[in-house]
Image: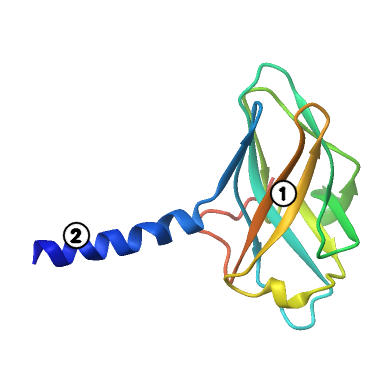
Amino acid sequence: MFKNALLLAALLLPATFATAHEYTKGDLHIAHPWSQELPPNAPNVAAYFVIHNNGTAADTLLRVDSPISDDAQLHEHVHKDGLMKMQQVQSVEVAPGKDLVFAPGAYHVMLMQPKDRSLLTDGKRFPLTLHFKNAGDITVEVTVQKQAPEGEVHNH
């Protein structure tokens, strides 16, 4: 019985690591890049992640790009005139010792008119390159999921 439990644990361990993917370059740490599965009629898709700056100086996310879209944009949600609106931003500062959260209802990456919609189904991954002023370029693999991870809805 113990051998069977041990075998099951060994088989499930890689699945745990497959969903929790993280990237570090210099002082920046990027945790769990993800995107929700693209509905059939949706023209655009968003990508999310958390950037933690372990350094003592700010860094700036200048832009993003991905081979699945010719137009990747940094966006934020803002309250304006009593409405929640999405707007493009030119860059985003990552304060030292802080987290910068890209999540539904907060900052996010918009991938406009994706070229290969087959990559935007549950379980697939696609590359996304984040271009920082100080840390340089960091390419991450965005995991596509049917639903947002637990606790990922923010209203900043």
Q: Position of residue 129 (x, y in %)?
A: 77, 48
Pointers 1 and 2 in contact (CB under 8 A)? Answer: no
In front: mark 1 or mark 2? Answer: 2
Q: Residue at x 54, y 50 (%)?
A: 21
> Badge 1: few (under 14), some or many (20 or more) residues near its Cα, within 10 Å?
some
Q: Residue at x 86, y 53 (%)?
A: 73
- Identity, as a three-letter code, of the amino acid under mark 2: Leu
Kindly identify which residue carries mark 2.
6
Question: Helix, strand, or loop for circle 1?
Answer: loop
Question: Helix, strand, or loop for circle 2?
Answer: helix
Q: Position of residue 33 (x, y in %)?
A: 63, 52
Image side of residue 74 versus residue 148, left or right: right
Mark closer to the chain start, 1 or 2: 2
Q: Is residue 60 above or below residue 44?
A: above
Between 44 and 7, the one lying in front of the other is 7
**What is the quadrant of the N terminus in the image?**
bottom left
The tag on residue 106 is: 1
The tag on residue 31 is: none
Q: Position of residue 53 (x, y in %)?
A: 65, 28
Q: Residue at x 66, y 57 (%)?
A: 142
Between 149 and 27, the one lying in front of the other is 27
Q: Residue at x 81, y 65 (%)?
A: 68
Any part of residue 103 in sight:
no
- The quarter of the displayed image where residue 91 is located: top right
Between 75 and 49, the one lying in front of the other is 49
